[in-house]
Image (spheres, helix red, strand yellow):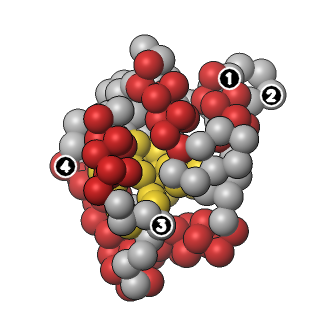
């Protein structure tokens, strides 16, 4: 089943966010991408889904999350997402400039679905992001949207 994806990208680096958004636009999948620059703002937005005035009208199908964010880092945000019963089923893809095995292990132990290193060259990042979207749009069964 092909579906459009509602994607939340949380990344404070404008250049990295542009690259990820560009990669998502290259996909054959119709993606709606919302970009947030810090962890606290992202958490507020996730907790207010569907409420009057909220930017997010429904839960994201996928969250792309940078580990190094201002105000609340990606690991702390991931922990809060996975502890919340309304949010924990959302696939979270960690994007990080770190290649440290400890960071990878921390992310997976807290429930991250995938860890992608930003240190890959640009074409590999675009391909990796596209592959993740194709998987979640065509193959995976997602939880109900609300």
Assess whether mark 2 and mark 1 are in contact (beta carbons under 8 angstroms). yes
The residue that label 1 is drawn on is 48
Residue 15 in picture, x, y percent from top left: 65, 75
Which residue is at 68% across, 23% downward? 48
123 on left or right of 1: right
Q: Earlier in the sequence, mark 1 or mark 3?
A: 1
The residue that label 3 is drawn on is 97
81 above or below 117?
A: above
**Where residue 116 is drawn, which disc sits there?**
none
Callout in the foreground (3, 2): 3
Which residue is at 40% across, 84% downward? 121
Is the residue marked by circle 3 packed among few (<14), some (14-19), or many (20+) residues within 10 Å?
Answer: few
Whether residue 6 is visible = no
Q: Earlier in the sequence, mark 1 or mark 2?
A: 1
Q: Earlier in the sequence, mark 4 or mark 1?
A: 1
CA gap, disc 3 to disc 4? Answer: 28 Å
Q: Earlier in the sequence, mark 3 or mark 4?
A: 3
The residue that label 4 is drawn on is 139
């Amino acid at each position: 089943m092909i579906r459009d994806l509602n994607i939340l990208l949380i990344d404070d680096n404008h250049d990295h966010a542009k690259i990820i958004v560009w990669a998502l636009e290259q996909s054959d999948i119709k993606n709606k991408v919302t970009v947030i620059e810090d962890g606290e703002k992202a958490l507020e937005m996730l907790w207010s889904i569907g409420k009057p005035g909220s930017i997010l009208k429904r839960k994201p199908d996928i969250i792309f999350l940078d580990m190094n964010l201002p105000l609340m880092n990606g690991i702390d945000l991931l922990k809060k997402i996975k502890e919340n019963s309304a949010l924990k089923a959302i696939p979270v893809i960690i994007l990080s400039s770190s290649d440290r095995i400890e960071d990878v292990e921390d992310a997976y132990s807290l429930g991250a679905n995938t860890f992608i290193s930003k240190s890959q060259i640009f074409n590999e990042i675009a391909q990796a992001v596209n592959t993740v979207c194709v998987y979640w749009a065509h193959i995976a069964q997602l939880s109900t949207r609300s």
